Amino acid sequence: MDDLYTMPVLLFFYLLVFKESVDPDSSQIEQIRHTELLQAIWLSTGNIKKEDIPKFSIYELDSLNIISNKTLAEQHAEREKKIAEQQKANMLNWMGVKPNGKQY
């Protein structure tokens, strides 16, 4: 209790807002901790190619879809868009066209 009396008022308000708005015991915060741990484990193995590092973001590793505040329909649409872009890039690469539209 003595800590509360000696704590600066501004720090007290910051901590109060953090506790009330962020809720450090929520499932979303727990999922962030879990996905950051997974990300650290995967990236520390040394077996990840440099171009594959963005695939290991906490949003990609969130298997329960708790972290993002998007609806399932929005997440599905984004996933379909990413898949379509990847398929297009693969097809252009197979045809020998560079990403800037020129032939190899």
Image (cartoon, rainbow, N blue to C red):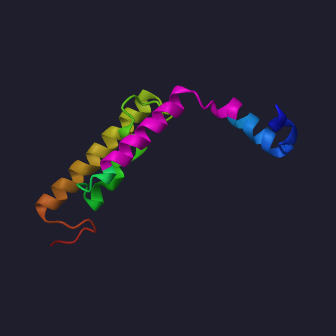
- At horizontal 87% and vertical 37% (from top left) the residue drawn is 5
Residue 92 horizontal/vertical position (percent): 18, 59
**Residue 70 left/right relative to 18:** left
Give the camera-side residue of 36 and 60: 36
- At horizontal 47% and vertical 38% (from top left) the residue drawn is 33
Question: Where the N terminus falls, by quadrant?
Answer: top right
Give the camera-side residue of 13 and 88: 13
Residue 52 horizontal/vertical position (percent): 28, 55
**Residue 68 left/right relative to 57:** right
**Residue 51 left/right relative to 8:** left
- At horizontal 26% and vertical 55% (from top left) the residue drawn is 48
User: Within the magenta stretch, is there residue 62?
Assistant: no
Up the image or down, 68 lies above or below 52; here it is above
Residue 30 horizontal/vertical position (percent): 50, 31
Up the image or down, 46 lies above or below 82; here it is below
Give the camera-side residue of 72 and 36: 36
Give the camera-side residue of 50 and 33: 33
Helix, strand or loop: magenta stretch: helix
Query: Which residue in the rendered view is the most extreme toward the front?
Result: 2
Looking at the rendering, the stretch of residues picked out in magenta corresponds to 19-42
User: Splitting the image into 4 quarters, where does residue 26 fall?
Assistant: top right
User: Within the magenta stretch, is there residue 39?
Assistant: yes
Question: Where the C terminus falls, by quadrant?
Answer: bottom left
Query: Which residue in the rendered view is the most extreme toward the left?
Result: 95
- At horizontal 33% and vertical 52% (from top left) the residue drawn is 43
